[in-house]
Amino acid sequence: MSKSTDTPQTGGSVRVFFDARFTRTRHHDGISRYGSCLLEALLRAVEGTEIDVTAIISDEAQLELLPECRWVKLNSPTSPQEVVIAGKLNALGADVVFSTMQVMGSTGRRYGLILTVHDLIYYSHPLPPADLPAAVRLLWRAYHLSFTPQRLLLGRADAIAAVSDTTKDLIAKHRLSSKPVTVVSNAAEVPVASARAQNRHDAKSLVYMGAFLPYKNVETLIRALEHLPGWTLHIASRIEGRREAALRALIPDRAKVIFHRGVSEEEYTDLLDGATALVTATQEEGFGLPVVEAMARGVPVAVSDIPIFHEIAAEAALYFDPDDPRSVATAVERLTDETLWSEFAAAGRRQAQSFDWDSSARALLEMIRSVHRARG
């Protein structure tokens, strides 16, 4: 166990530990970005209050992607030591612990615990992320065979944070927890941008940002190009070589797909600013951060007709059947109308203002206080 040198021992404060051990060390993924942005906003929210926040990390390289703050280094969340982490936090004097995931060890805890649920996707799409250790992937599959393990994990918490109303509704639908559930929403990392100078209705350029797991359904986006002659699909995210080869084999004759294999923030911004639309044909989603980020920049979005996107994009998106390439093409082609493109760009900027990290931090702060009060 190691600590930052300025970790205070403040009498009378509420000692909150923010589990940031799912932070990446080089580039954010969705959960890593969620934790980093939420922590930064929470630190602003608690300034001048009785709340004292310390981040939990497992690798000092994670600090590069986290805001400057007090921190303590504990075990990795996938380590066997996770079963005794509660004892370590008890020794540190934790009053409330918030985790950006739901799998944190808690045996013997003497503090309030808030766990986070992002989505229930892996019950219907149980393929685990390939970067997890083999033993963890095996446990992952076993965990998602039924809802029982999830109920047991969530039953250990004092309160549950959900990243969207859609996820909150699914928790209720499947009776995963009797504990109070509060939405601590995801949001765009950047503030809503002012209107861009150039209308891109005629750019014939589409951008996809996201993972390549089967449920992400990138295949449908590629097949849609058969009905979009002259259009280019930019696939911005990092991709493993064999997966790229499999997707390349689907590209229709004379269609253009550019695999960028990962881009910097600046490069991604340039891609969005030159695009007619951001597109995603995912069959399920916990939130859909790229959609909100595109709307915040005034980039129209064409997305799957699924509940989460109606929650986050409302009337600001064009919707299509994610299993029908022609439906994708029909939605995209509507944006070649200059006036309609401008209307969706403006509607997206307005809708993106519904999600901001400061509001999410205030929701989390109220959860922290409520859990602390309930524990006396």
Image (spheres, helix red, strand yellow):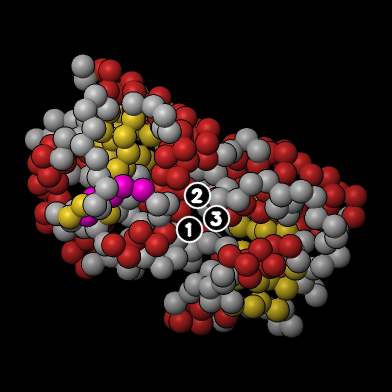
Q: Residue at x 45, y 45 (%)?
A: 40
Could you tell me if the residues under marks 3 and 2 are in contact, i.e. CB atoms within 8 Å?
yes
The answer to whether the residue labelled 2 contacts the one labelled 1, judged by CB atoms less than 8 Å apart, is yes
Q: Amino acid at mark 2?
A: Glu
Disc number for residue 282? 3
Residue 10 to residue 370: above or below? below
Q: CA distance from mark 3 to mark 2?
A: 6 Å
Q: Above or below — where is 230 with respect to 128?
A: below
The type of residue carrying mark 1 is Tyr
> What amino acid is labelled 3 in the image?
Thr
Q: Which mark is residue 284?
A: 2
Where residue 283 appears, as percent x and y from the top left, is 53, 52
Quarter-of-image position of residue 204: bottom right
How far apart marks 2 and 1 lie (CA) works out to 7 Å
Q: Is residue 340 magenta?
A: no
Disc on res. 215: 1
Magenta residues?
69-73
The image quadrant of residue 371 is top left
